[in-house]
Image: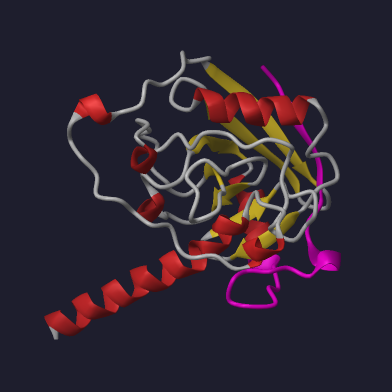
Amino acid sequence: MKKLIRLTGIITLIMMLALLAACGQADDTSADTQESDAPQVEEQTSDESNAQASPEGIGIHHAEIEVADYGTIKLELDGDTAPVTVQNFMDLANAGFYDGLTFHRIMDGFMIQGGDPTGTGAGGSDQNIVGEFAVNRYENNISHVKGVISMARRGDDMNSASSQFFITVADADFLDGQYAAFGHVTEGQDVADKIASDAKPLDDNGTIAPEDQPVITTVRIID
């Protein structure tokens, strides 16, 4: 019985990693990004000399994501842990990039994903950023617990994150070290949870029909 329980847990983890593959569609507009493999996790090393030198921290910042018909999700952004990621998110928000975009991929019990100008999972901004996470040799100790905001990317490219982000609505620490978490919800987790519970995905990958995608009215950087 214990072996059966252990096997069931392993199968569940494998299924979740497979579902995560759509994060791999995140920021490549080419046609072949509609399908991608789950992240390839390289063997990690404890040798600190192999770690990338992180840019200088930019401190703690705060943002608000206003979602039409739902409310506002307030966030604390950790610019000391993931300075490149936070600066990119703030720059896009300040430029109005996110205004009017949607949450195009939603999986209740996992996460809500948005920030794609095409609404398909294959779009992004005009530049990619480095992946600030352990598998890419960047120190990032933010665990993907419920309420964490992190960057989506193509599963086969560590440095393919661009504009797409996701907010977890359940603990998903199996993502740790593979995706650039860069902050957490401080208020409005109920908004994210409601978006997730209301969703009617078209498939097991969380695809939402264009007319049913919750609209991001604006993303504001508070400080």
Q: Position of residue 51 (x, y in %)?
A: 30, 28
Quadrant assignment for the C terminus: top right
Q: Where is residue 176 in the image (x, y as percent from the top left)?
A: 37, 47
Relative depth, front residue between 196 and 121: 121
Q: Which residue is at a point 68% across and 35% down the rendered structure image?
A: 127
Q: Which residue is at a point 21% across and 27% down the rendered structure image?
A: 48
Q: Which residue is at a point 46% across and 45% down the rendered structure image?
A: 179
- Residue numbers of the magenta segment: 197-223
Relative side of 215 to 208, left or right: right
Q: Which residue is at a point 50% across and 68% down the rendered structure image?
A: 19
Q: In which quarter of the image is residue 206?
A: bottom right
Q: Position of residue 161 (x, y in %)?
A: 58, 42
How many numbered marks have been drawn onto this rendered protein structure?
Answer: 0
Colour scheme:
secondary structure
Quadrant assignment for the N terminus: bottom left
Relative side of 53 to 3, left or right: right
Q: Position of residue 22 (x, y in %)?
A: 57, 62
Relative depth, front residue between 47 and 211: 47
Residue 55 forms part of the magenta stretch? no
Please, is residue 109 above or below residue 126 in the view?
Answer: below
Please, is residue 164 above or below residue 77 in the view?
Answer: below
Relative side of 62 to 66, left or right: left
